[in-house]
Amino acid sequence: MPTLPKTPPAPAKTPLWTCPFCPLLCDDIPLARTPDERLTAPHTACPRLAESLASFTQHDASRKPAINGQPTDPTSALSQAASILSHARRPLFGGLATDVAGARALYELAAQCGAILDHLHGDALADSNRVLQDRGAFFTTLSEVRSRADLIVVFACEPARRYPRFYERVIAEDRGVNIVFVGCDVDQAAPAHAESILPGTDPFDTLALWSAHVEGGRPIPLAELVALTERIMKAQYTAFVYEPSALPTQHAALAIEALQRIVKAINRTARAGALALTGDDGAASVNQAITWLSGFPVRTRVAYGLPLDHDAHRYRTETLLQRGEIDALLWISSFAPEPLPASLADDVPVIVLGHPSTTLPARNAPTVFIPVAAPGIDSGGHLFRVDTSVVAPLAAARDSALPTVASIASQLAQARRPQ
C-alpha cells in the first residue's frame, strides 16, 4: 500500500471524536457531514475509517427488524428471538462485535441460556490467551512505545495494512526511532529509515534460532539476527510488534510464545516489551469483560447452576458449526455488516443483532434480524484499546434511535425469566 499522508491537525474548536473501528481507538478525529447526511472524516488520513463510515447512511434509523426476511415490528422480533433461545439447549453466541456494555448484557443472557461465547476474531484471541495462560507475557503500551522506545522490531507483519495510523500513534515526531522488520519486507507506510532483515524466511525457523541465541548464547548462522540482538541490548527500550492474525494459522500460539520468550530473555539485562496488534471489532473489550465476569476468556460455556466450561478448541465457532453441535446461533455484528458463517447449517435457527445495512440470505430455519446501534456512531459506549491499558469512552456521532446490543440482550433476558 502507498505511504499514507500524516493526518493534519484538527480545525480549531472542532469537537473531537473517538473512532471505534480499530483497536487503536484514535481520539483526535473531527467528523463532518456530507450534503446527504453521511458521516465523513475529511481531516483524517485513514482508509479503514473512511470505508467504515461509508457503510452508514441516513436511512439506517428507518431499517425495521425482520423475521424470515419479512419486515416486522420490534415487539414481534423480540418475541420470536426469545422463543428461539427458550427452545435451544446448546446455543452459540457468536460474532460478539460489541462494546463492554454489550458484552456484559450478553453474558447475563448466555448464563440463562447455557450458551457458548466466541468472538468473530476468536482464533487470534485464543492464540494470545493460550500463551498468557501457559507462559505469561511482557506487554507494553502505545504510550510507553511513543515515549520510551528508541527501537521498534516488527515481526512478520505490516501494521499499516489493518491499522493505517499505527506509526502516527507510536512514533513522536521529535524522537529518533529505528524500525527493523524481521521476516517480512518493510511496510510501505513505515518511516523512510525503516529496514528489513530475513524477509520471506519461515517465522518458526527464525524464532527457534533467535531463541537459542538470546536465551542460551548459542552461535547461530544468521548474522543479521546476531547484529539485531546486539542493537537491542544497547537500546534504551525495544518494542516488539506482532499481529497474531498475520502469523501462520497452524500453531500461531507457538510463534507468539517463542517471541514472548525472547522478550523475557532480553529483559534480564535490557528493557523490552511486546505489543500485539489485535482486538478488532470489540474483541479486546469482549474478552476482558467475559474474563472479568467468569474468570475465563472467550470460548467458554456459561450456565447458571453449572460449572463454567472453557475450551479454546472445542468451542471454536467453526468447529461447533462443522460438527453440528449447536441448535441456535445469536450473531452479533454491530460495527459492520458481517455475514453469517459459511459453515452454518440451514436448519439452525438464527438471531442477528446487526449493523443496519446487514443483508441475510433466505434460510429454511427461523431467522430474526434486529438492527442495532453501532457504539461510537449511534450510541455511546466503552472499548478497550489495543494494549488493554486504556478503556476509551465513545460518544454517539449521530442520533438514530437504534437500540443498543446491551438493551436488546437485557430485554431478551427479561423475556426468558419466569414471570
Image: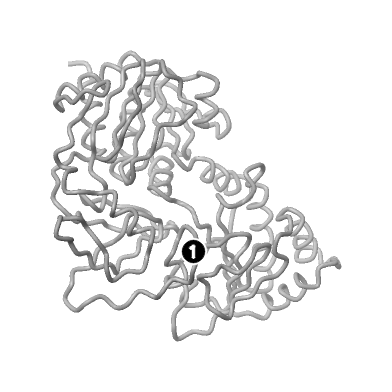
Label 1 SS = helix
Looking at the picture, which amino acid does disc 1 mark?
Ala
* 257, above or below 405, in the image: below
Please name the residue that numbered disc 1 is placed on. Answer: 160
Q: Of 31 and 292, which appears nearest the observer?
A: 31
Q: How is the image coloured?
A: one colour
Q: Residue 352: horizontal and vertical position, in percent?
A: 31, 30
* x 43%, y 44%: residue: 287
- Give the answer, above or below, for where 3 lies relative to 388: below
Relative to 299, does residue 164 appear above or below in the rendering? below
Q: Is residue 281 above or below residue 345?
A: below
Q: Which quadrant holds the C terminus?
A: top left
Q: Horizontal and vertical percent for residue 156?
A: 63, 59
Residue 11 image position (x, y, % from top left):
21, 77
Name the residue rendered at 63%, 62% in the picture.
155
In this view, the residue in front, 416 or 67, is 67
Q: Give residue 87's position: percent from left, percent from top.
A: 33, 13
Q: Is residue 354 left or right of residue 298?
A: left
Residue at the outermost front position = 35
Q: Quadrant of residue 94?
A: top left
Q: Residues within 10 Å of mark 1 (few under 14, many from 20)?
A: some
Q: Nearer the viewer, residue 62 or 223?
A: 62
Total marks in image:
1
Residue 323 in which image quadrant: top right
- Name the side, left or right, on which 66 lies relative to 359: left
